[in-house]
Image (spheres, grey):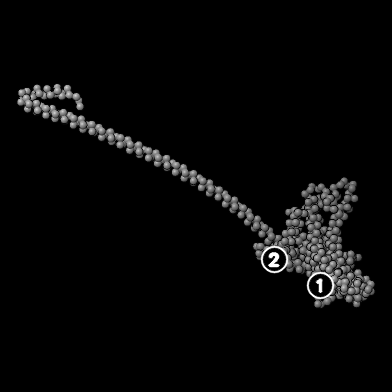
């Protein structure tokens, strides 16, 4: 009565994973750690839950050993959804591009995509970066749509949000870090960029100032990483915990209340999915803009970036 | 959960870079170009409309001015021709008047001349008649020479008219 498709499917998924956990006994005793079992859903895993087919074991590659670092490049659930989001985005964007190139006036789906593009261009890039930011527009558009689709994927039945994995957001933040430094160096020149790291203070203070400034460079993308990851995983944990109440109480009678709450959280998640994609893009654009503007300020230190 | 998985980081970076390259070439470039083209078209159309409006206003103003000028010209021509006609009329009337006056004058002179001539003739006639009458009365007692003298002197004593 109160449930939506996605609610019931999440419930289904949780039930499945609970059964699986109970059967395999991997995650402690059956009654033992419900929270761990619930978190199994938001964790990355080597199995993929598919409708009608059930669990699919994803290929496992032998880890690559580089020095002390072991890199496991196996395809996991989040990699699959990462690719799914990428392929979906390519299909959608290319379709929109085809449609808009043919028509003089955009219509339907092409128009929808264009609304987002216009928003990113006129409300995000131009105010933060000025005219020089236009050449970074493809990067920012890709970031926005990619994150948006990955965020939304978690709201779809059987879906999973890749951005709720800290590794994915770390990679996105790493790319943002590279882009922020690259745009600053391109706008200021390498000499000015390095001079900017000294904070414009007396050279005696450099040993203090330079580590602080370098640290400052990393805090911005670090904040991007944590913000996106925490927001995306937070909503999912809330949803799963609410669903978990049904199992805690061991009763179907209690079900309508958590499901009502889950419906509300789901709607909030829908909003958060858009909001976080926007915030990630907007802040990346802002940080790039700060680095680029520093070039026009004639070396005066800009503290507002921190 | 919080321990990053390097494999996933690598996959994400590879996926993102490939996605960026593909989208940049096949999606963002045509989309942004179409957008820019349309914006340019709209801007051009607006500018053209503005220009056309200005032109139309200018032409309207010009037409109005021309109309005013034509009206004034028409008024001026009308006034001119009216005054010309007035003058012409006055001239013609004046000429006619003077001509008629002249004609009357010459007619008067003619009449006077005829009257004079008639008078002279009448005088001669009267003299002859008087002589003949006197001759008949006196039965030619006087010769003609003397009679004439007599009559003439008598006529002289008569008033001129």
What residue do we see at 76% from left, 68% from top? A88
Side (left or right) of A158 relative to B46: right
The residues bearing labels 1 and 2 have C-alpha atoms spaced at a distance of 33 Å
**Frontmost residue, A61 versus B123:** B123
Crowding around mark 2 (Cα neighbors within 10 Å: few <14, some 14 to 19, many 20+) is few
Q: Chain of mark 2?
A: A
Looking at the image, residue B70 sits to the left or right of residue A23; the answer is: left
Q: Is residue A158 visible?
A: no
In percent of width and height, residue A158 lies at 82, 72
Foreground pick, B137 / A232: B137
Does residue A295 appear left or right of residue A244 in this picture? left
Residue visible at 42% across and 42% down in the picture? B81
The residue sitting at 11% across, 27% down in the picture is B130
Label 2's element? helix
The secondary element bearing badge 1 is classed as loop
Question: Looking at the rendering, which quadrant does residue B10 occupy?
Answer: bottom right
Q: Position of residue A237 (x, y in %)?
A: 87, 67
Name which residue lies at 81% across and 57% down.
A283
Badge 1 or badge 2: first in the primary sequence? 1
Residue at which label 1 appears? A1
For disc 1, the chain is: A
Return the mark for residue A108: 2
> Residue pushed farthest front?
B137
């Amino acid at each position: 009565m109160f449930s939506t498709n996605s609610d019931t499917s999440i419930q289904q998924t949780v039930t499945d994973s609970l059964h699986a956990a109970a059967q395999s006994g991997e995650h402690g005793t059956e009654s033992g750690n419900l929270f761990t079992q619930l978190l199994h859903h938001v964790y990355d895993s080597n199995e993929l839950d598919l409708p009608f087919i059930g669990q699919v074991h994803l290929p496992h590659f032998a880890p690559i050993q580089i020095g002390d670092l072991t890199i496991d490049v196996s395809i996991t659930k989040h990699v699959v959804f990462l690719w799914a989001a990428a392929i979906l985005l390519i299909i959608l964007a290319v379709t929109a591009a085809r449609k808009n190139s043919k028509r003089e006036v955009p219509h339907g789906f092409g128009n929808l995509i264009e609304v987002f593009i216009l928003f990113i261009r006129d409300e995000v890039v131009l105010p933060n970066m000025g005219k020089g930011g236009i050449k970074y527009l493809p990067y920012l558009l890709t970031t926005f749509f990619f994150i948006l689709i990955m965020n939304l994927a978690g709201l779809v039945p059987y879906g999973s949000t890749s951005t709720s994995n800290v590794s994915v957001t770390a990679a996105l933040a790493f790319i943002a870090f590279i882009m922020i430094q690259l745009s600053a160096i391109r706008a200021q020149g390498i000499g000015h960029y390095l001079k900017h790291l000294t904070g414009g203070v007396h050279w005696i203070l450099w040993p203090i100032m330079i580590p602080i400034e370098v640290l400052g460079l990393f805090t911005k993308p670090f904040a991007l990483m944590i913000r996106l990851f925490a927001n995306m995983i937070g909503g999912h944990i809330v949803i799963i915990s609410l669903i978990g109440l049904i199992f805690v109480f061991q009763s179907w009678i209690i079900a309508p209340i958590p499901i009502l709450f889950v419906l509300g959280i789901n709607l909030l998640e829908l909003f958060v999915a858009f909001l976080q994609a926007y915030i990630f893009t907007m802040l990346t654009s802002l940080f790039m803009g700060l680095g680029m503007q520093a070039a026009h300020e004639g070396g005066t230190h800009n503290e507002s970036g921190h | 959960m919080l321990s990053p998985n390097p494999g996933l980081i690598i996959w994400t970076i590879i996926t993102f870079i490939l996605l960026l390259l593909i989208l940049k070439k096949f999606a963002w470039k045509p989309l942004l170009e179409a957008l820019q083209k349309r914006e340019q078209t709209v801007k051009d159309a607006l500018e053209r409309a503005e220009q056309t409006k200005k032109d139309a206003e200018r032409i309207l103003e010009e037409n109005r001015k021309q109309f005013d000028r034509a009206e004034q010209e028409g008024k001026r021509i009308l006034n001119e021709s009216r005054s010309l006609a007035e003058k012409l009329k006055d001239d013609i009337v004046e000429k006619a008047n003077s001509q008629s006056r002249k004609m009357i004058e010459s007619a008067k002179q003619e009449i006077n001349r005829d009257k004079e001539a008639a008078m002279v003739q009448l005088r001669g006639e009267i003299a002859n008649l008087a002589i003949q009458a006197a001759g008949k009365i006196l039965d030619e007692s006087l010769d003609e020479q003397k009679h004439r003298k007599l009559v003439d002197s008598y006529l002289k004593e008569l008033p001129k008219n």
